[in-house]
């Protein structure tokens, strides 16, 4: 069993802890937060477990009980937090988006390899059983003609923007914006399914904070294009689809995939390809990450590393094309 600590005490962290411990392969040992009350409030939800709390990051990093650290701090802190944990000899599970730019990610992967440690970006959707069915089913399409992938989910924090506030998720100084929050899920899906694109273009909706509230990306491949829609300003029930010579694959959402349907246009039939999805939506990634670390599966880690590099290359390029700059990039 892997002992781990967490940095970041938001909803995604609770979800990861619940799902990780449900695998019986992870055991939460410590929580770091800048505020002691926040750390204790987080720990209180796990009655019957002895969990250390820290407000000093150096002391947390020095905890010898921790084999790994899951990092879900604000985006702009991912690089510095991951670097400190790797230097302390911990494996790192790093919530998306990994880093602000490719230079930071290069440094982290270099450090992880020098220390013989795993650094894994936590893309939950590509580890889902139903997402894997989607990818495996692409062979049924014949020649790929294109795809559309949508992740449009209204955020209550957008109302705060309309009220004149500047939440972290819509603040470029904190590494925010819809592209790096929801948009990365669509980019990550496309790159996992089709590989790295030849080129990418982003058409953002710029909001009061100066960040993007949403937008459309177009990824160019050799013989087709992929259209991505991601926003935190409105909701959409539009499915995600992959179009091919022999039919269309349809999923209702690109994360937490509940079904995969193959539409045959010649006999006008729908075939359900996917079964029931995992109720604990991060359990599949937690199981895979534990397997990689415990078995020393560097080949699997290498594939995930390349995926992280390819996704960041796209988002970094289109951000800069649109003047969506993070600290140190101006």
Image (cartoon, rainbow, N blue to C red):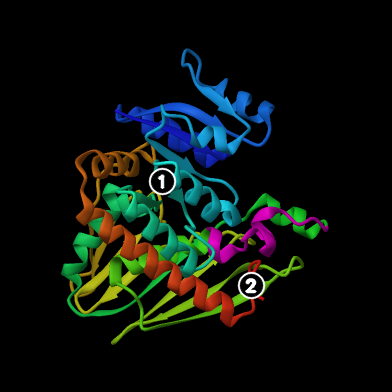
Residue 254 locus on image (x, y percent): 40, 58
x then y, percent, for residue 205: 65, 73
Task: Report the front residue among 312 and 163.
Answer: 312
Is 25 in front, or is 140? 25
Whether 24 is among the magenta residues is: no
Q: Nearer the viewer, residue 309 or 266?
A: 309
Q: Which quarter of the rendering shows the C terminus? A: bottom right
Give the CA distance from mark 1 to mark 2.
Answer: 25 Å
Q: Is residue 236 visible?
A: no
**Total residue callouts:** 2
Which element type, helix, strand or loop, lies under badge 2? Answer: loop
Q: For mark 1, does the 10 Å Cα neighbourhood hold few (<14), some (14 to 19), or many (20 or more) residues?
A: many
Examine the rendering and report whether any part of residue 75 can be seen: yes
User: What label sits on residue 38 in the rendered view?
Assistant: none
Whether 321 is drawn above or below 87: the answer is below
Q: Residue at x 83, y 58 (%)?
A: 164
Image point 64% across, 53% down: which residue? Answer: 155
Judge from the rendering whether residue 3 lies leftward or rightward of residue 30; answer left or right: left
Q: Residue at x 41, y 46 (%)?
A: 93
| Picture layout, residue 151 above or below residue 324 | above
Q: Earlier in the sequence, mark 1 or mark 2?
A: 1
> Which portion, as a residue range, is magenta?
164-181
Asked if labels 2 and 1 touch by Cβ distance under 8 angstroms, the answer is no
Specify the label residue 325 is tagged with: 2
Q: In the rendered structure, does residue 180 fall within the stretch colored magenta?
A: yes
Q: Position of residue 314 (x, y in %)?
A: 45, 74
- Residue positioned 20% across, 48% down in the render: 297
Q: Is residue 123 left or right of residue 156?
A: left
Question: Considering only vertical position in the picture, is 8 above or below 300?
Answer: above
Name the residue beneath numbered marker 1: 93
């Amino acid at each position: 069993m892997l002992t781990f600590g967490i940095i970041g005490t938001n909803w995604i962290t609770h979800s990861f802890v619940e799902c990780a411990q449900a695998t019986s392969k992870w055991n939460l040992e410590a929580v770091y937060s800048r505020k002691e009350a926040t750390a204790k409030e987080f720990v209180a939800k796990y009655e019957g477990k002895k969990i250390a709390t820290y407000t000093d990051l150096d002391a947390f990093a020095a905890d010898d009980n921790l084999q790994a650290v899951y990092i879900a701090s604000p985006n702009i802190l991912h690089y510095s937090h991951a670097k400190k944990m790797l230097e302390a000899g911990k494996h790192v599970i790093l919530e998306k988006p990994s880093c602000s730019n490719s230079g930071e990610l290069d440094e982290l992967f270099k450090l992880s390899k020098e220390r013989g440690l795993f650094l894994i970006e936590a893309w939950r959707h590509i580890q889902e059983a139903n997402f894997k069915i989607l990818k495996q089913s692409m062979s049924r399409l014949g020649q790929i003609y294109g795809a559309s992938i949508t992740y449009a989910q209204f955020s209550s924090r957008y109302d705060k923007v309309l009220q004149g506030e500047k939440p972290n998720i819509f603040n470029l100084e904190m590494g925010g914006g819809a592209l790096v929050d929801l948009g990365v899920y669509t980019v990550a899906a496309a790159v996992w399914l089709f590989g790295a694109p030849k080129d990418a273009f982003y058409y953002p909706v710029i909001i009061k904070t100066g960040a993007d509230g949403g937008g459309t990306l177009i990824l160019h491949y050799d013989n087709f294009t992929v259209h991505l829609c991601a926003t935190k300003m409105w909701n959409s029930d539009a499915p995600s689809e992959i179009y091919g010579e022999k039919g269309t694959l349809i999923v209702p959402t690109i994360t937490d995939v509940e079904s995969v349907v193959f539409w045959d246009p010649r006999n006008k039939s729908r075939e359900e390809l996917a079964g029931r999805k995992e109720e604990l939506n991060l359990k599949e990634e937690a199981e895979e990450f534990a397997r990689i670390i415990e078995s020393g599966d560097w080949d699997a880690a290498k594939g995930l590393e390349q995926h992280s590099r390819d996704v960041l290359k796209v988002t970094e390029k289109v951000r800069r094309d649109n003047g969506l700059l993070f600290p140190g990039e101006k």
